[in-house]
Structure formats: C-alpha cells, structure tokens
Image (tube, coloured by chain):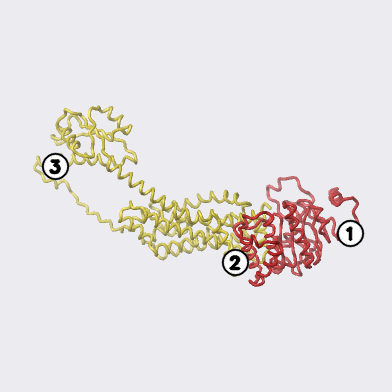
C-alpha cells in the first residue's frame, strides 16, 4: 500500500505540472465551458428578442383602392407600430421579395372574399411566406395577425346570425400536466448534463493516461521504474489512482463550471434557472459522482491499456482519439427522447450512466434499477482493470518497439 | 556477484517481423527467434564485466533478464545470491540499472526524482538525506537540485540519472550502453562512476559496442553474437589470444569467424 501511495503521489505531482492535463482538467471545464454556455444562451435569447421586436414588412393585396375586409385589415395593420405596410407591388413581385427576405409576408385576399364571408363560406386568404428555422418567430406573428382578423369576422357572423359565440365549443379540455418542472426539464435538458460530464470525465483522464503509460515508455523511464522493488500491480494501481482522480476531478470541475455558467448568464428565465439549479443539487450531484467512479475506473483501464500498448505519446494519441466517438455515441443516445432506463439499457455502459442521471434528476429512479446500473458498472470496471493488469504484465507490450 | 547459466530467451515474432527476411536464420525457427541462446558467464564483485557485441546481439535482452525486466525462457540467473525469477524483489533491492537511452521525468526536480526512487527502495529519511548530500556534493549538483529536470543541460541530466541509479547504494550495477548518444564530457562522468563502483567493491556489468570503453574499464568480458557467447574470459586472456593488432580488428575477426 505504501508503494502504491509513493507512486500515486509522484504521478499526481507530475500530472498536475503538465499543462495539457491542467487545460483539460481546469481551464476548459471551468472557464471555457461557462463562457460558451453564457455566450450561446445570450445569443439565442437576443436573437429571439430581435425577431420578436422586429418591424414586420407585409404587403396586403389587392392594393390601395380596394374596399371591404382587405382595406379594413390593411388599416388595422397600418395602425400598429410593429408592422410596415408595403404598397404598390403586385403578387409576383411580392413573392420574389419574400423569397429574397426583403418582405416577411404577402397576404392576398380573394377577389370574392367579402361575398364568401357574407354567404357563410370561408373567405380565402393566401399567405406567402418563407419558413425557415430562423424565421419561425416572424411567421408566428403574421399568423397571429390573421388570426385576429378571423376572430373578428367570426364574431360579426355570429352576431348577424344572433348566435352565442360560445356554442362553437363542443368540448372543453382541461389540461393539467402533473409532471413537475423538474421532471419536464429532466426530460428536455437532463440528458445534456451527464452527456457533457461523461465527455469531460473521459477527456480529463485521457492526458494523464497517455503520459503515465505511453509517455513513460517513450522516455524509457518505465524500464527503470520496473527495476525498482515496486511490484507491477503497485505501479499500475498508483498510476490508475491518478488517472481516475483526474477524470473525476474534471467531472466535478465541469459541474461547477456549468453552475457558474448558468449563474453568470442573466438571460435565463427565473423558473428555468431555479429548476436547473435544482438539478445541480448536492444529492443528485453526489449520486452522479458515485456512478461516475466505476465508469472512470473503466475509462482509466481502457485508456491505460491502449496507452501501454502504444510506443509513443503520439501513437497513443492517435489510438485514443478515435475512441472519443465510442464514448460520445452511447452518451448521445441518452440524450434522445424515448430512450428510458430499463433492465436492458441499465447494462449498456455509458448509456446507463447517462439515463440513470436523467432519472435521478427527474426523481424517478428506483433502487432496483439503480443497483443494476451500479452492479453492471462495477463488473465492467473490475473486468477492465484485470485486462489492464494482464496487458501490463506482458513483456511484448511493455517492450514493444524497443 | 552475478551468475548466469545457460540462459535462453525466445521471442515470438510478430507478423511484421516474420515477413522480414534479414536477421540470423540460425536463431529463427517456427516463427520464434532466440535472442539469447545458452549464455553463461559470471561477474565477480569488485570487477568490471563488459558484455560486448554488435547491435542486435542480445546484450540488452541479457541485461534486462538480469535486471528482472524480462523472464528467461530457460536457464538461471543469480544476482547477489538471489534467483532473478523466484526472488525478483530481493534482486531489485540490490540492483542499480542505468541505460544510455533512459530519460527522466522533466516536470520533477532532481531532489524529487531521487527521493522518489529512494522511497521506492524503502530508504528512511535520514539515510536518504545523508546519501543524497554525499552524491550531490560528489557530482556538484546542489546548485540545480531544485530546478525542473526539463530545464537542465544533458550533462546535468546525466548526473541526475547517476544519482537515481546509486541512491540506494546497490551492490550490483547494470549499465546498458550507458554512454550511447552522450558527448565526451558527459560520457566521462559515466566512466568515472563505473570505476568508482569497482573501487567500492560492487559487481558491475556493462554492455557496449565501443571497444575503447572495453580497454578502459574491463576486468572481464564476454563477446556475444546472435545470442551466443563467442568469447568469455578476463581482459588479459582476451589480449593474450588476440590474432590482430587492434581490439576492433580482433573483434571483427571473431564475429566473421562465427559467420563463416
């Protein structure tokens, strides 16, 4: 045990003095990450606000000189501050302008519109617009304006027929969503938290794992270390401890970074903010970390095994970098809606941590399924650790390329 | 004392290596290669033993087996009376190992690095401090004892390597091509270290392919080629049976004799 601690202490000093480890462990999750959250959320919200406040350019046809509903509607729009009526263009020209984003919409009233409405038929209005993700807000605003006209005409029609407007409703549905804000948020963004933490955890353990195995092999220091009275298992466990610790620390720092990012972003609505902060409460975070521990042991074992196999730091990097995809995919699947934690998904490494975290945040996890996740993670960690030990014991691996 | 008896080390060839046709066919069979094939010699305390041979002769593999890094396929190695396979820890406690190609931990300072190895050897703090001060004074290292190794010159680094090897006062010292890639001044430190070890009564074995070092240091030597010993005896005996003028020429003559 003493030897393991000696090795652990030395490897820890060596690792924290490594700029690459520090960047992956502290700079990215603590500074870069909150900055990114803050910038992206501010950008999204300010874009939405811009679209909301923008003056809409609308052409209403037939143009000036028309009478009836088209004229009334044009007048209503003209009185609004957030709409500019574009005059003097035809239908085709209007369509071209919409296509080139110079106009938000062209609204064309059928020549028989008023007759149709009077004859108790639906009056036809054609609305030309360009729907893309970025123009969704504008489109919604034009629809609401038309909706206002529809309500007005309906009210008039009912009045003329001497009918009560309320008879239009045949069913009244009282919707009461019993999911708590916490549950709804867990569903919507709860997957993102473990996804990011798992990736940070992997990234944090990556550089120490490469340096402590392949790096040491490349320098030739592994050879001298192996001639010392430290046993192979002791050396491995000492190194292992540092890789696991840096992985976990990176995860903790990234949680703190997220907290900081959310706190610093003043654009997040208060109810969402309090729900997110609820997600980051101590109990959930501790449970998540307890799930991350065996997962990090697994990461450390895989990373060290691959790193031990490599002849140099560079070779280890080129072997390990593609592995990132293998980590990202199951973590990403956990983000998808409809994928739930059950007895099968609880056995799939990485995905199970992702889903279990989601369930922990939502407060819907059951002890039985949580136990299954733990057991499968611990079994995986144990198997990978033994594999790593086997790799470390092989002369052909240790002296590969020398 | 080091006693090596009928030592064999067989490596399995990788697919890549099997495709390569060069290399001694005598030691290749069924996809295996005998890197060391029946090597025997004895290194006495207070004497310097040179293991001489061309590149790929099996010198490093032999020394790695003595240093417990590799397990022999067959044969026996006794280091300071302990079997290297059955009691590797006892061997490791009494052994110092230095290779010319070994680098150090750049982010530690000499003090930390030497302490690390002292701790691994289970030295207590007082003994460590005394021994470290002795060695640091001897090699004039106090000035840079707390500077990061990455910022030291190659000569300074070599001194750190020496202290790292000698901190636990090993009775057996293994040098694997210790001067390879070093400039003349730095190599001189190593030569002096090897001499000092001899004076202290330690058992010293070093591998080289530089004949000048052999004449400078050796009491005993073994010439190894294709994993087999082609000469073993004292340096004086070697000189006595020489059929060529210079050591280099005699060395080449012996190697060519085996090839024919």
Dot 3 alpha-carbon crowd within 10 angstroms: few under 14, some 14 to 19, many 20 or more = some
* Chain that appears yellow: A
Q: Is residue A302 visible?
A: no
Between A358 and B164, the one lying in front of the other is B164
Chain label for disc 2: A
Dot 1 alpha-carbon crowd within 10 angstroms: few under 14, some 14 to 19, many 20 or more = few
* Residue extending furthest toward the front: B143
Residue that label 3 marks: A155
Q: Is residue A177 visible?
A: yes
| Labels 1, 3: one chain | no
**Helix, strand or loop under label 2:** helix
Reply above or below: A250 against A93.
Answer: below
Location of residue B160 in the rendering, given as x and y in whole percent from the top left corner: 67, 60
Foreground tag (1 vs 3):
1
| Mark closest to the chain's N terminus, 2 or 3 | 2
Query: B248 left or right of A274?
Result: right
Between B189 and A185, the one lying in front of the other is B189
Residue at image location 69% in from the left, 57% down from the top = B158
Location of residue A210 in the rendering, given as x and y in whole percent from the top left corner: 58, 54
Between A46 and A330, the one lying in front of the other is A46
Q: CA distance from mark 2 to mark 3?
A: 84 Å
Between A280 and A115, the one lying in front of the other is A280
């Amino acid at each position: 045990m003493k030897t393991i601690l000696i090795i652990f202490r030395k490897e820890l000093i060596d690792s924290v003095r490594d700029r690459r480890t520090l960047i992956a462990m502290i700079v990215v999750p603590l500074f870069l990450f909150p900055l990114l959250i803050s910038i992206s959320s501010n950008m999204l919200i300010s874009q939405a606000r811009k679209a909301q406040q923008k003056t809409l350019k609308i052409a209403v046809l037939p143009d000036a000189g028309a009478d009836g509903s088209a004229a009334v509607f044009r007048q209503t729009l003209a009185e609004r501050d957030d709409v500019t009526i574009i005059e003097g263009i035809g239908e085709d020209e209007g369509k071209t302008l919409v296509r080139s984003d110079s106009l938000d919409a062209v609204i064309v009233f059928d020549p028989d519109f008023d007759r149709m409405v009077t004859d108790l038929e639906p009056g036809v209005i054609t609305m030309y617009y360009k729907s893309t993700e970025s123009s969704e807000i504008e489109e919604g605003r034009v629809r609401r304006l038309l909706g206002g006209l529809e309500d007005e005409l309906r009210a008039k029609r009912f009045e003329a027929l001497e009918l009560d407007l309320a008879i239009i409703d045949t069913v009244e549905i009282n919707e009461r969503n019993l999911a708590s804000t916490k549950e709804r948020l867990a569903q919507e963004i709860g997957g993102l938290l473990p996804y990011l933490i798992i990736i940070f955890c992997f990234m944090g353990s990556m550089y120490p794992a490469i340096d402590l195995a392949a790096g040491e092999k490349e320098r030739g220091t592994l050879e001298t270390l192996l001639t010392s009275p430290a046993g192979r298992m002791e050396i491995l466990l000492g190194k292992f401890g540092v890789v696991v610790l840096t992985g976990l620390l990176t995860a903790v720092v990234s949680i703190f970074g997220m907290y900081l990012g959310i706190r610093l972003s003043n654009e997040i609505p208060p109810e969402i903010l309090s729900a997110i902060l609820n997600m980051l409460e101590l109990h959930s975070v501790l449970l998540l970390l307890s799930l991350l521990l065996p997962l990090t042991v697994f990461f450390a074992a895989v990373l060290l095994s691959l790193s031990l196999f490599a002849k140099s730091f560079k070779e280890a990097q080129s072997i390990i970098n593609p592995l990132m995809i293998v980590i990202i995919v199951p973590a990403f699947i956990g983000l998808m809606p409809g994928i739930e934690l059950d007895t099968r998904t609880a056995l799939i490494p990485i995905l199970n941590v992702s889903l279990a975290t989601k369930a922990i945040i939502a407060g819907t996890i059951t002890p039985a399924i949580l136990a299954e996740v733990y057991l499968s993670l611990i079994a995986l960690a144990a198997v990978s650790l033994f594999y790593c030990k086997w790799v470390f014991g092989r002369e052909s691996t240790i002296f590969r390329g020398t | 004392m080091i006693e090596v008896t009928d030592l064999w080390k067989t490596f399995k060839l990788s697919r890549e290596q099997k495709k390569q046709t060069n290399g001694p066919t005598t030691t290749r069979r069924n996809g295996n290669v005998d890197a060391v094939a029946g090597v025997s010699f004895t290194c006495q305390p207070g004497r310097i033993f040179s293991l001489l041979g061309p590149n790929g002769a099996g010198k490093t593999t032999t020394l790695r087996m003595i240093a417990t890094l590799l397990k022999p396929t067959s044969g026996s190695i006794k280091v300071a009376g302990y079997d290297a396979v059955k009691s590797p820890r006892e061997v490791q406690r009494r052994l110092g190992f230095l290779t010319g190609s070994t680098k150090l931990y750049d982010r530690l300072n000499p003090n930390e690095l030497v302490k690390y190895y002292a701790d691994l050897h289970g030295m207590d703090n007082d003994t460590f401090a005394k021994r470290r001060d002795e060695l640091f004074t001897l090699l004039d290292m106090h000035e840079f004892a707390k500077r990061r190794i990455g910022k030291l010159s190659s000569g300074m680094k070599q001194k750190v390597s020496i202290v790292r090897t000698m901190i636990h006062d090993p009775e057996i010292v293994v040098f694997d091509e210790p001067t390879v890639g070093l400039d003349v001044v730095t190599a001189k430190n190593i030569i002096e270290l090897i001499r000092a070890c001899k004076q202290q009564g330690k058992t010293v074995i070093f591998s080289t392919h530089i004949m000048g070092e052999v004449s400078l240091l050796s009491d005993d030597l073994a010439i190894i080629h294709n994993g087999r010993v082609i000469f073993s005896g004292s340096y004086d005996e070697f000189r006595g049976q020489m059929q060529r003028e210079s050591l280099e020429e005699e060395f080449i003559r012996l190697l060519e004799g085996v090839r024919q």
